[in-house]
Image (tube, rainbow, N blue to C red):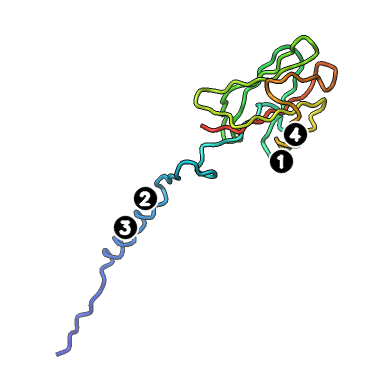
Amino acid sequence: MVDNHKKNISWHFIFALIFSVAIMALVFFASPTYAPSGVIGAYSNSDSATGMGTPILDKGTWFMYNEYTGGSVSYDIQAGNPKNGENIIGSYQVTNNGDGTYTATYNVNQGVQVDSGHLAVSSSPNFTAKPGQDANQSFGVPFSDPSGTGTFYVFAHFSVEY
């Protein structure tokens, strides 16, 4: 005897199977990924920050410099590229010490830790946007006005963790 009944897979079954795979893929790719502590890279809580001001270069970096024109001045510290939204994590100050020297200091918000700070001071805004190479001064240490006019440019860079 010949069985004339074909075994067909229901379209409902195929649709349900595809839908289930799609849901599993969505859950897998949309769920947060956690990295072990101490991992540096895409999942770390580290960031780069700079004084909010004028971009050093037109393209290639978002690092900024500030112009100092006298007195005691405070500049906001921006963490991360400002095109991704403003993220002010503190400020740095440049103070005229009254004896021909100036001192730069910084304050960051609670929960922010500064791993390193680089300070560059110049008579012109000729920074390279390379913090370690541009650095020619230190925070908390008095320095002289490079221009001798009371007006100079400052590139402040910070490596921070949250």
**Front position among marks 3 and 2:** 2
**Front position among marks 3 and 4:** 4
Q: Classify the position of the N terminus by image quarter.
A: bottom left
Image height check: is 42 above or below 67?
below
**Front position among marks 4 and 1:** 4
Q: What residue is shown with label 1? A: 59
Q: What residue is shown with label 3? A: 20
Q: Residue at x 82, y 23 (%)?
A: 146
Q: Amino acid at mark 4?
A: Asp
Image height check: is 134 above or below 95?
below
Q: Are marks 1 and 3 in contact (CB under 8 Å)?
A: no
Q: Amino acid at mark 1?
A: Lys
* Disc assigned to residue 27: 2
**Front position among marks 2 and 4:** 4
Secondary structure at badge 4 equals: helix
* Disc assigned to residue 45: none
The image quarter in which residue 125 lies? top right
Q: Residue furthest front?
A: 141
Bin the neighbour count of mark 3 within 10 Å (Cα to Cα): few under 14, some 14-19, many 20 and up: few
Q: What residue is shown with label 4? A: 134
Q: Residue furthest bottom?
A: 1
Q: Earlier in the sequence, mark 3 or mark 4?
A: 3
Secondary structure at badge 1 equals: loop
Q: Position of residue 66 (x, y in %)?
A: 72, 24
